[in-house]
Image: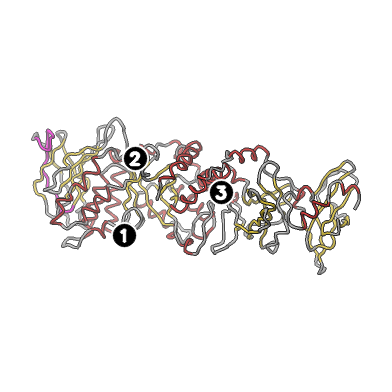
Amino acid sequence: MRYEISEVVKKDQVMELVFGNCSKPKDLLGRHFILQGQVISAYHPDAVKMEVISEDGEHYPMDTVERQPVFSLFLPHKRPFSYQIHMTFHDGNTYISSDPYSYEGLITEEEEKLFSKGNWTEVYHKMGCHKVKLGNTEGMYFAVWAPGARRVSVVGDFNYWNGMLYPMHKMENSDIFELFIPGLSCGQFYKFEIKNVQGDIIQMVDPYAVMNEEKENGASRMFDLGRFRWEDSRWLSKRYHGNVFKTPMSVCEVRISELDSPDEKVQEIVQDMGHTHILLRGTPERAKLGVERGFFEPAFYGNTPDTMRFFVNRSHKRNIGVMLEISPEYLTRAVHLFEKKHPQAVNYLLANILFWIKEYHIDGFVFRGLSENSSDFLEKAKEVIKKEDNSVLFIGEEIKGKQTRDFFDFEWNMELKAGVEEYLGTDFEKRQGKYFCLSQPLMKGDFSNTLLLLNKEKNNLFDESLIDKKPSCDYDKLTGVRMSYGYLMGVPGRKAWDLHSHENISSQEYVKSLIRIYQEYPALYEYDPLRASFEWINGMDAESSVLRFMRKSPSGRDNLLFICNFGTEEKENCQVGVPKAGKYTMISNSDAVEFGGEGRDEHQEVQAVSECWDLRPYSIKISVPPLATLIFKF
């Protein structure tokens, strides 16, 4: 070995490399400039001969070092030039490739410091696997945090999963390992092979992977997030400058398992119904396979990031927002990591939240299944989200022992629908005793910034649908469901519907009409803290089973009167107190023929008279069909 080579290549480094214990292979391999010129070294466990091929086609034979498959070349000049390594193996086969160890790393010293302190929120731009072009060479750049590892290698279908090839280089001030491998392309599979200080070797998927195989012990898959072109700048600008508390918001829940094709059928349905947002809910299928989904991996049909981004992009172009459900399983894993208090682990979780905002243009996050110990993580997550973009919504449910009303933008209302379900699930002759299940939840305070779930499916929030709750009787069950939807649309708070919560055509038309009314009348959506938008007319009339309340707009115009008959008998000449004189015009009747009803008492328009009723100075007399909700404007 020439003495010039010995200035760079040390025997102990060679032994560490060939025995698979090298954490800093760039100290040995690649190109190194010295006083006399430059030294180029390369390694392959199966190579018997190597040459350097310069950019002008010149071949330079390399010498073996310490009788190991490590090869070095000294050149007596410092002129930088591009080169490749020509390898010959035991069986006579040859292979030419660029030298991975001749390229500089991409993570800067400042980013390394931010990561160690837990403040590198855009860490996903470099950690994981990314398609890059360094100079004129394309390939994949890999980086992973592996605290305490003796060696980390990139393995995959491109190197026969051999951890002795492509050992990664450990950065100076952290446990980040990185390596650029020329020639790799999207679609190839890979893992990180880690050898710990005890000598144990494991292979793990990339924690930052955006694609993983759908099987147990599957590998990560290389993907280029940078190739997608968004077309939703108008929507993002509208969201950023808008005020969701003063605009209509109707959410449609969609299970990702229902999105089995790239067409826009779901968006068409959502847009036709008048919903403003889609809430994407995950599916448990992968858990059944024993596969834990990665934090950065979308649970979407086709299992590719771009299918989800196509969906979000198309939704935004139709002026439909897209929110993402954070499942209890995800939250449990996230809280477990967060509680360890490692800055790097906390950084990973918070960067993951920002990743969905920046790379998938998600408009909000919905949390379910919250535990008492999740509040610290959620508080930090909200801080990061709102600092990045205050228009991104943060929605959750009550946490036992925590004051969350001011914590979330919107909070799940668990009581109102439960009260309706309990009432409807009671036999008719016993309902009078359950009347306050309807009115009592509304007497506990302001629900303007709540989200009320009106779904059909059985889930962890409510055990059964409104149809399931209603006992068998002589009346059409759907009549009671329409009445209930009308009542729940009138109570304060935004509404979340299931995509299939109104499969009956007539009921679907009724829901569509309710959403149209909701969007047309600010009294139902515009919140003014100085002026209560909800006011009872009479919520105590258990004997008649008729609820009466008002929704008032901030402007004082186009107020709405809701009259909900939960009884099975028509209320003729039902007297209702009202706040002022004038005309009261019916704008909705759940018993209308076009909604599947019998068409009783349609198109009512009444004049208030100066007769005190329900502690109001004026009153009207109307007929209210059984199991019906009437809406009047005044």
What type is the residue that disc 3 sits on? Arg
Q: Is mark 3 on a helix, strand or loop?
A: loop
As for residue 613 lying within the magenta part, the answer is yes
Measure the C-alpha gap from mark 2 to mark 1: 28 Å
Question: Closer to the camera: disc 2 or disc 1?
Answer: 2
SS at badge 1: loop
Within 10 Å of disc 2 (Cα), the crowding (few <14, some 14-19, many 20+) is many
Residue 503 numbered tag: 1
Q: Residue furthest front?
A: 198
Part of the protein shown in magenta: 612-627
Q: How is the image coloured?
A: secondary structure
Give residue 454's mark. Answer: none
Task: Residue under label 2, please give it.
Answer: 449
The image shows residue 475, relative to residue 406, as above or below, that is below
- The residue tagged with tag 2: helix, strand or loop? loop
> Who comes first in sequence, dot 1 or dot 3?
3
The stretch drawn in magenta includes residue 495: no
Give the residue pinned by disc 3. Answer: 229
